[in-house]
Image (tube, helix red, strand yellow):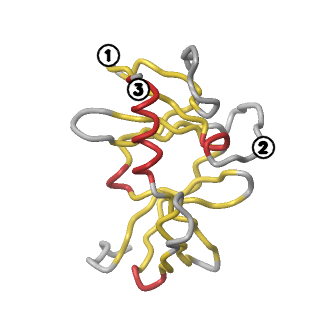
Amino acid sequence: MSAPSDSDLQMITFTLDGATYGVGVDEVAEVLRMVEVQQLPQAPHWMAGMIDLRGAIAPIIDLRARLAMTQLPYDLNTSIIVLRHGEGRHVGMIVDAIDDLVTVDRGQVEQRDGNPSLKGVARCDQQLIMMLDIAPITRDAMSALDS
């Protein structure tokens, strides 16, 4: 496989409610298997809680709840994608399952300005990938943790 060009986007894809979503690899710090999450009192319904991430507190959101999807119990495929949020801070989001690392040509991305949760939709190998806009999600999670 050749190295990605400047016109390519690399994304980690994941499943949520049967659909495929993606976030840029540059936005991801790491991927974890589901761990115990400490609940926060009086937190928004989509805030699962927090974890100790190598000595730092990281808020964890349930992405299904944040996107107003039906809640399901966590299982062996459930994962936490740890996202970068500013200097040395992280936010985790719980997803149904991790799928793949994909490279998409920027020309295969359609912008979606009408949906605040999405940056766009990409076509890759006969599949549609909804590109998640993590900025409002991480910002809201940090606000909930700090308040």
Horizontal relation, residue 52 to residue 74: left or right: left
Give the number of the mark in front: 1 or 2: 2
Residue 79, image x and y in percent?
58, 37
Circle 3: element type: strand
Which image quarter: residue 38?
Answer: top right
Quickly name the residue at label 1.
55
- Verify CB contact (< 8 Å) between mark 1 and mark 3: no
Q: CA distance from mark 1 to mark 2?
A: 32 Å
Horizontal relation, residue 81 to residue 95: left or right: left
Mark found first going from the N terminus, 1 or 2: 1
Circle 2: element type: loop
Say what amino acid the circle numbered 3 marks: Ala
Horizontal relation, residue 69 to residue 7: left or right: right
Residue at 48 percent across and 83 percent down: it is 108
Say what amino acid the circle numbered 2 marks: Thr
Residue at 41 percent across and 80 percent down: it is 105
Residue 16, image x and y in percent?
67, 51
Q: Nearer the viewer, residue 28 or 76?
A: 28
Mark found first going from the N terminus, 2 or 3: 3
Residue 50, image x and y in percent?
49, 21
Quickly name the residue at label 3.
58
Which image quarter: residue 19?
Answer: bottom right
Give the number of the mark in front: 1 or 3: 3
Residue 135, image x and y in percent?
40, 50
- 87 w.r.t. 146: above or below: below
Q: CA distance from mark 1 to mark 3?
A: 9 Å
